[in-house]
């Protein structure tokens, strides 16, 4: 009877080690991939907000792009992102401004993604958003 208990005890320990290993791996994936996923989601929101702000600022400042750039740049930097290129004014066939387009970029690094070369492009999130002026 005692030898049977010893065998079962080894099976339980093996099972527990497997559960701990799986939990550790799942936790590692969440800790490493979570910030990357959140970065992509938040960058899209930042681009939408920046385009909306650019549109309102363009109308309120009567097309003064210096003021528009300054306001948008402040918003984007507040959210730890950067503008890619310049704020683009989209015009219709008559030359009248109809919308603004803003591209935003944000990079986040985690230990694995930073140290494994082929994963590093995933740390950059880039998003473009457009907002109508009227």
Image: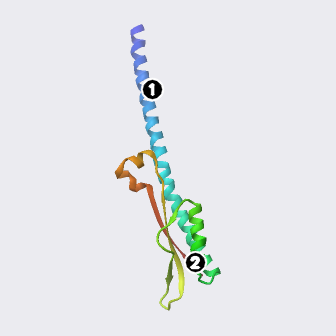
Residue under circle 2? 66
- Residue appearing at x 43%, y 22% in the figure: 13
Compared with 2, 43 (above or below) is: below
**Left or right of 124 on screen, residue 80:** right
In the figure, residue 3 lies in which quadrant? top left
Label 2 vs 1, first from the N-terminus: 1
Closer-to-camera residue (81/130): 81
Compared with 18, 82 (above or below) is: below
- Residue appearing at x 45%, y 43% in the figure: 29
Q: Give coordinates of residue 56: x percent, y percent.
A: 62, 76
The disc label shown at residue 63, or none = none
Dot 1: what SS?
Answer: helix
- Residue appearing at x 51%, y 70% in the figure: 129
Q: Nearer the viewer, mark 2 or mark 1?
A: 2
Q: Residues within 10 Å of mark 1 (few under 14, many from 20)?
A: few
Residue under circle 1? 16
Q: Residues within 10 Å of mark 2 (few under 14, many from 20)?
A: few
Look at the image and name its color scheme.
rainbow
- Residue appearing at x 49%, y 44% in the figure: 31
Closer-to-camera residue (50/133): 50
Compared with 66, 25 (above or below) is: above
Dot 2: what SS?
Answer: helix
Closer-to-camera residue (54/115): 115
Quadrant into which the N terminus falls = top left
Q: Give coordinates of residue 61: x percent, y percent.
A: 63, 81
């Amino acid at each position: 009877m005692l030898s049977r208990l010893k065998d079962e005890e080894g099976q339980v320990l093996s099972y527990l080690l497997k559960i701990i290993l799986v939990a550790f791996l799942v936790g590692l994936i969440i800790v490493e991939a979570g910030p990357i996923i959140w970065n992509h989601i938040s960058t899209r929101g930042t681009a939408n907000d920046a385009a909306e702000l650019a549109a309102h600022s363009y109308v309120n400042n009567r097309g003064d792009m210096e003021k528009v750039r300054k306001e948008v740049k402040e918003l984007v930097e507040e959210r730890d992102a950067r503008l890619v290129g310049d704020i683009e004014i989209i015009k219709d066939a008559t030359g009248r401004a109809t919308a603004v387009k803003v591209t935003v970029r944000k990079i986040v690094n985690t230990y694995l993604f930073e140290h494994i070369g082929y994963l590093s492009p995933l740390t950059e999130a880039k998003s473009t958003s457009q907002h109508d002026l009227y």
